[in-house]
Image (cartoon, rainbow, N blue to C red):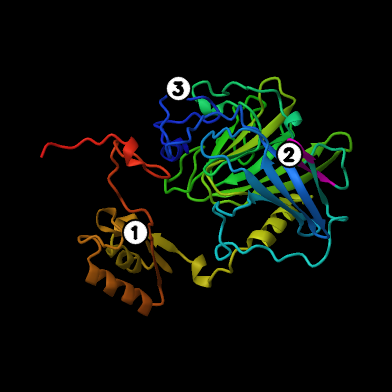
Amino acid sequence: MLSAIFAWLSLTTTLAWGHTSSLLQRQSTGTISHSMNVTNCPGYTLGSLAENEYGLTAQLSLAGTPCNAFGTDIMDLTIEVTYQSQTTLHVKIYDTANQQFTIPESVIESPPAPTESFTGSSDLVFNYDPSPFAFWITRRSDPEAMPIFDTRITSFPSTPIPPFNTSDPRTAFDGFPLVFEDQYLQVASALPYGTNIYGLGEVIASSGFRRDIGTDGGVGTIQTLWARDVGDPIDQNMYGSHPIYLEHRFNETTNTSSSSGVLLLSSAGSDIFLQTPANSKVSLIEYRMIGGILDFYFFSGPTDMEVIAQYGAMIGFPMWQPAWGFGFHLCSEDIANVAAMRAANIPLEVQWNDIDLYHAFRGFTTDPVRFPGEELQQFIEQLTANHQHYIPIVDAGIGATVNTTDVLGQSIDLREVEMVREPG
């Protein structure tokens, strides 16, 4: 999980998300102590608001004393609501000073600004309460139905809610305020009881494609989004991070079903909780992030396929694949494997190399025994001459010694650090 990362960010040796830590708290800057608890986080109040033909822009201000749960509360926020199209609603909440990290346009290009107004015709409708600020998203065709996304405190069960995993204090819910700090963001939505949630990958979920939401004997889900090279673990974060979920719900009154999608466009490490507290009439989803902004896209569907099409239109569709990409691929441990394939008359389109290509897993090297530099160069040239392709892994991670005595944080005030010097 992300507790190790938070431990570094919060200058503590451990972290109990949403739950008071009994361990010594260190000062991040000498002036602000992290409370490790969201119970007293005041939320935000809506200030000035300006509507336009495509949506609205408004200012949010911290509604009380900063709680500084896991970072420094940001006092002033801006919310922009854009009816992007008939089927897509964009809700963006960010720090007014624009200091928080946002995904660059060069990585994911934002959809073009609408040239047609959908505020009165969009499938989805943005609703809000000014104080404490909360918003909820409804279908225009069925405004009385439970919202697709609902952050109102009154929609949640009462808190505090004890940990649903008694051995993991992070699984407690001490409150559901909107928290927007420099290194911790929290927002939650009530969901229909036992609803069907899919997505939030990459993961091999023990519950199957339908995510465990804590009903029907389930224990709920903590989905970490933090990409890592880890093989195929069960119920853990893996290679990709895809912060989108598809919800499919059935209306017993009308005997109809519909699907919608929610994308939180963020590259920040996060834990996403799916849970149904004991004796609760609703289920819930809660995002806990270590940075960035809240950049939501809501897709109206109403079918599963339409949700995916709307998501693809926004995020970008996969590139067309070359014909050789559909051929036989081999990831081998030495150069001789290609010759063995040729001797066995097995067609081979692509040769891959994994981390074993490198000397002691060090980037920008080659293993001197299995992949000597000159031999590897000749090998690649032979593949090219034979109209075959070569793909080596490029690992961004470079090993570093980690000392338990390191003191890391936003800044280090050496006047507050006890220095221990070796003799001599």
**Looking at the image, is mark 1 or mark 2 earlier in the sequence?**
2
Q: Secondary structure at mark 2?
A: strand
As rendered, which of 325 and 222 lies closer to the eye?
A: 222
Q: Amino acid at mark 1?
A: Ser
Numbered label attached to residue 332: 1
Please say if 246 is above or below 116: above
Looking at the picture, how far across and down is residue 333, in whole percent?
A: 30, 57
Q: Is residue 284 left or right of residue 423?
A: right
As rendered, which of 64 and 396 lies closer to the eye?
A: 64
Q: Residue at x 68, y 63 (%)?
A: 111
Residue 108 visible here: yes
Looking at the picture, how far across and down is residue 17, in whole percent?
A: 52, 31
Looking at the picture, how far across and down is residue 115, in whole percent?
A: 79, 67
Magenta segment main secondary structure: strand
* Crowding at mark 3 (Cα within 10 Å: few <14, some 14-19, many 20+): few
Mark 3 → mark 1, Cα distance in angstroms? 50 Å
Q: Amino acid at mark 2?
A: Phe
Q: Is residue 185 left or right of residue 158?
A: left
Where, by quadrant of the figure, is residue 88 drawn? bottom right
Q: Which residue is mark 3?
A: 22
Q: Are marks 3 and 1 in contact (CB under 8 Å)?
A: no
Q: Amino acid at mark 3?
A: Ser
Please tell me whether residue 137 belongs to the stretch shown in magenta.
Answer: yes
Give the residues drawn in magenta, as a range: 129-139
